[in-house]
Image (cartoon, rainbow, N blue to C red):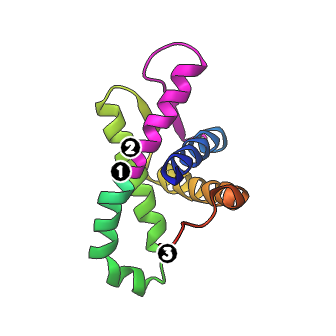
Amino acid sequence: MRLVIRLLINAVALWLTTLIVTGVHVTPFAPGGTLETVLTFLLLAVIFGVVNGIIGNLIRIVAFPIYILTLGLVALLVNGLLLLIVGWISGLLGFGLIVDGFWWGVLGALVLGIISWLIGILLRPVIGKPKSR
């Protein structure tokens, strides 16, 4: 259940990011109405979760000394790169995220992180803590 809620949070945060940041756009996978757009954002949230979980963790492990050296500021650049990778993967699938450049990706990742964090704070009573066994 927590995975589904996290997916919805990321999809809504991505949608709000595309409304706020002009350099980040989304092209639905099929022309049409609201359903296609919602499904596109959900698919992008899944792609973003997979990319962040696999490639993001790998980059964070390899670049750990750089994170320490820059006091974590390099995370902004890494998250911008991950957003560009999501755009590239979704573009290969024929729909999805369009990022106009690297710095738009960094700004988009920053806004996406802040919005996701705020929504997570609002939904914390709903999500709750995982049960310990």
Label 3, secondary structure: give it. loop
Please state which of residues 54 and 65 is positioned toward the viewer in this rendering: 54
Query: Which disc number belongs to residue 92?
Result: none
Please state which of residues 62 and 129 is positioned toward the viewer in this rendering: 129
Residue lying at the far front of the rendered structure: 133
Query: Which disc number belongs to residue 73?
Result: 3
Q: How crowded is mark 3: few (under 14 residues within 10 Å), some or many (20 or more)?
A: few
Give coordinates of residue 17: x percent, y percent. Answer: 61, 45
The residue type indicated by label 3 comes to Leu
Residue holding disc 1: 50
Instruction: Measure the alpha-carbon separation of dots 1 and 3.
Output: 23 Å
On the picture, is 57 further left or further right than 23? left
Q: Which marked residue is nearer to the observer: mark 2 or mark 3?
A: 2
Question: Which numbered disc flags the more N-terminal residue, 2 or 3?
Answer: 2
Give coordinates of residue 89: x percent, y percent. Answer: 31, 39
Q: In this view, does 96 lie above or below 100?
A: above
Label 1, secondary structure: give it. helix
**Residue 118 visible in the shown view:** no
At 45% from the left and 69% from the top, the residue drawn is 75
The magenta-colored residue range is 21-50
Please state which of residues 12 and 108 is positioned toward the viewer in this rendering: 12
Please state which of residues 129 and 40 is positioned toward the viewer in this rendering: 129
Give coordinates of residue 115: x percent, y percent. Answer: 65, 54
Q: Residues within 10 Å of mark 2 (few under 14, many from 20)?
A: some
At 30% from the left and 58% from the top, the residue drawn is 54
**Residue 7 visible in the shown view:** yes
Q: Are marks 1 and 2 in contact (CB under 8 Å)?
A: yes
Residue holding disc 2: 47
Residue 42 belongs to magenta span: yes
Label 2, secondary structure: give it. helix
Q: Residues within 10 Å of mark 1 (few under 14, many from 20)?
A: few
On the picture, is 107 further left or further right than 128? left
